[in-house]
Image (spheres, helix red, strand yellow):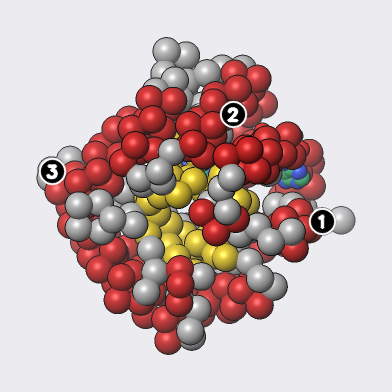
Amino acid sequence: MLRRTLLAAAASDRLRRAVTTTPRTRAIVDRYVAGETTADAVRTARELRARGLLVTLDHLGEDTTDSGQAAAVADEYERLLGALSAAGLTAGGGCEVSVKATAVGLFLPENGEKTARENIARICRAARNAGTTVTLDAEEHTAVGPTLGIARELRAEFGDLGCVVQSRLRRSAGDCAELAQAGARVRLCKGAYDEPAGVGYARPSEVDRCYARCMRVLMAGRGYPMLATHDPRLIDIATALALLSGRPSSSFEYQMLYGIRPAEQLRLADTGAQVRVYVPYGGDWYGYLVRRLAERPGNLAFFLRSLLPQR
Ligand SMILES: Cc1cc2nc3c(=O)[nH]c(=O)nc-3n(C[C@H](O)[C@H](O)[C@H](O)COP(=O)(O)OP(=O)(O)OC[C@H]3O[C@@H](n4cnc5c(N)ncnc54)[C@H](O)[C@@H]3O)c2cc1C
């Protein structure tokens, strides 16, 4: 119930204005978001790489409403990839980028899919020039089919283009089977969006069971699994599956979000595993932050207190 209310808050313009204009929310924003500029993103990536962690950078932004805005998002990714490459951070995929299809035009009323596909291809070219890769984030269920379709098409030219499967969605076991067979790079996460009953699983236990099923398929397949979760039980299952299937640590990776379980990120990396941190940056952090709070309501009291007038 609380999760549902918080996810509705992510869409509220009034609340967005209240939160984003309150300076005291800064501390909690800084914990989860690397900063607002390209330079902030590069600095954070450098710090994480120095600690032996891999990085994927996400330029925050949702609700792209015209093709100019979509092109500007692709421009920012080109700038970012150029800056990461100049800083020597992209070699061997050490720092890659995560892109939302809706941010580069997917939901535009005219030629949305075409616009998104062209912008994503442009970002893939910039990533290839920088020696690294792109992963397409998963969004609400209406975006999932078209995003996976774009990834399927573009993998013909950019074989290392990654995509994301959410275990909250009932379709996901089938998607995993297809992607494992295709040898794709696949990030598996639980899914951050509230989905209708016919489309998604309602109970956390069902989402977790689906995660374990999908993980088995991906780890047994020909592709490169990217296991994105902070859940200690699922991380243990992943480690056991890697041992059982004889998968070397270079053939898959764990992924976690910036600011969440940082000690566990380092512990896993110390065991010789590859660990990638998903680092969001940019001015449009509100929707991202609310989704993180919905997952950890314990942080909510701290956040709400920061909105109250100080005595
Ligand atoms: C790298 C990465 C990329 C992602 N990309 C996408 C995407 O493209 N699309 C999408 O919809 N979602 C994405 N997500 C978000 C994801 O779908 C989940 O919403 C989010 O990861 C929370 O799920 P969880 O697996 O951590 O499990 P949860 O069910 O939230 O938590 C399970 C357990 O993990 C531990 N835990 C969780 N959070 C914390 C914390 N803050 N501190 C300490 N312990 C904690 C606790 O033990 C908890 O019981 C991504 C997540 C990651 C890590």
Residue at point 42%, 13% (across, down)? 198
* Quarter of the image with the C terminus in it: bottom right
- Residue 31, given in percent of the width and then of the height, sits at 69, 60
Residue 228 visible, this angle? no
- The residue under label 3 is 110
Locate residue 278 relative to residue 119 in the image: left or right: right
Mark 2 residue crowding within 10 angstroms, few (<14) / some (14–19) / many (20+): many
Residue type at mark 2: give it. Ala
Circle 3: element type = loop
Circle 1: element type = loop
Residue at point 49%, 46% (across, down)? 225
Of the residues under marks 1 and 3, which one precedes in the sequence? 3
- In the image, residue 310 sits, relative to residue 298, either above or below, namely below
Tell us which disc is closer to us: 3 or 2: 2
Res 46 → quadrant: bottom right
Res 159 → quadrant: bottom left
- The residue under label 1 is 310
- Residue 94, given in percent of the width and then of the height, sits at 51, 70
- In the image, residue 1 sits, relative to residue 119, either above or below, namely above
Disc 2 to disc 1, C-alpha distance: 46 Å
Tell us which disc is closer to us: 1 or 3: 3
Disc 3 to disc 2, C-alpha distance: 39 Å
Instruction: Specify whether tag 3 is near ligand 1 (CB below 8 Å).
Output: no
Label tally: 3
- The residue under label 2 is 212
Circle 2: element type = helix
